Image (cartoon, rainbow, N blue to C red):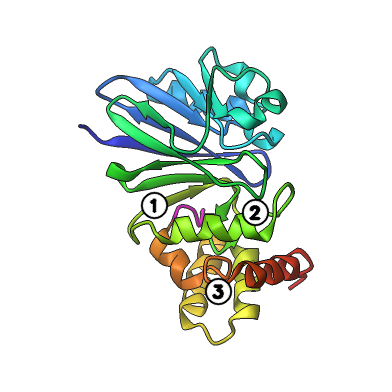
Amino acid sequence: MGKLDIVQVPVLSDNYAWLLHDADSGETVAVDPGDAPPLLAVAEARGWQVTAVWNTHWHPDHVAGNRAFEAPVTAPGEEAAKIGRVDHPVTDGDTVAIGAHRAHVMRVPGHTQGHVAYHFADDSVIFTGDTLFAMGCGRLFEGTAVDMFANMERYRALPDNTIVYCGHEYTQSNGRFARSVEPGNQAIAERMVEVDRLRAAGEPTVPTTIGQERATNPFMRATSAEHLGERRVAKDNFTG
């Protein structure tokens, strides 16, 4: 099995969409295309043709570009009515593939009720949409702290070297909050030095890894659903 190429494509104000390419099969997947033209330009420059679209959840900044691609759409079945055309509805335990690279679908509700993540165990890669961010988690728009805590337990159980591709560039603000709730956490302090350097240079801070998140993410480090819920409310009101 050849390498799975993954290309980060900034879209809209602070979103990341992703292009996955398998050279052996020639297949290319667009993950969460909130805006199509940037992905189309990157694909064309590399000589790739998008053969499938995968969505993690229904929010427009992740699905608005779907219709620009003449490719089947894989997305959470629970959210198909909100997304529009969904050719391959998926939920927890399903499997999707690009070439020989197979991804396990994880249902991770909370941000939206049907939200899914795509985990390529053999490639040590996961696409978490708006559930797990670098040093953060998604707002609880449609679910509860119990939902999100269960997600964090599943993420924590993954190998530390798993590379996390999430949906937004929120790391700097997330890190400021993390530092406020865990002021004695040296790993957070050290990570923020690098985050601030990268953002000052206009560079992305994503992807991250499960190991980094275990050490520095206040939501993954929450000890209970109640603890996570308290931290989520505090983050929602954080102005630091």
Q: Which residue is mark 2?
A: 138
In the image, taking residue 144 as reference, residue 52 lies left or right, namely: left
The rendered magenta stretch, by its main secondary structure, is classed as: loop
Amino acid at the residue labelled 1: Ile
The answer to whether one can see residue 170 in this image is no
* Percent of width and height locating residue 144: 69, 56
Image quadrant in which the N terminus is located? top left
Give yes or no for contact between labels 2 and 1 (Cβ–Cβ under 8 Å).
no
Q: Residue 205: say if magenta.
A: yes
- Quick one: SS at disc 3? loop
Q: Which residues are magenta?
A: 204-208
- Quick one: SS at disc 1? strand
Assess disc 2: are there few (<14), some (14-19) or many (≥20) residues with their C-alpha within 10 Å of its C-alpha: some
Q: CA distance from mark 2 to mark 1?
A: 18 Å
Q: Which residue is mark 3?
A: 223
Pick whichever, 90 or 218, lies toward us. Answer: 90
| Residue under the point 51% across and 15% down | 71
Q: Which residue is mark 1?
A: 163
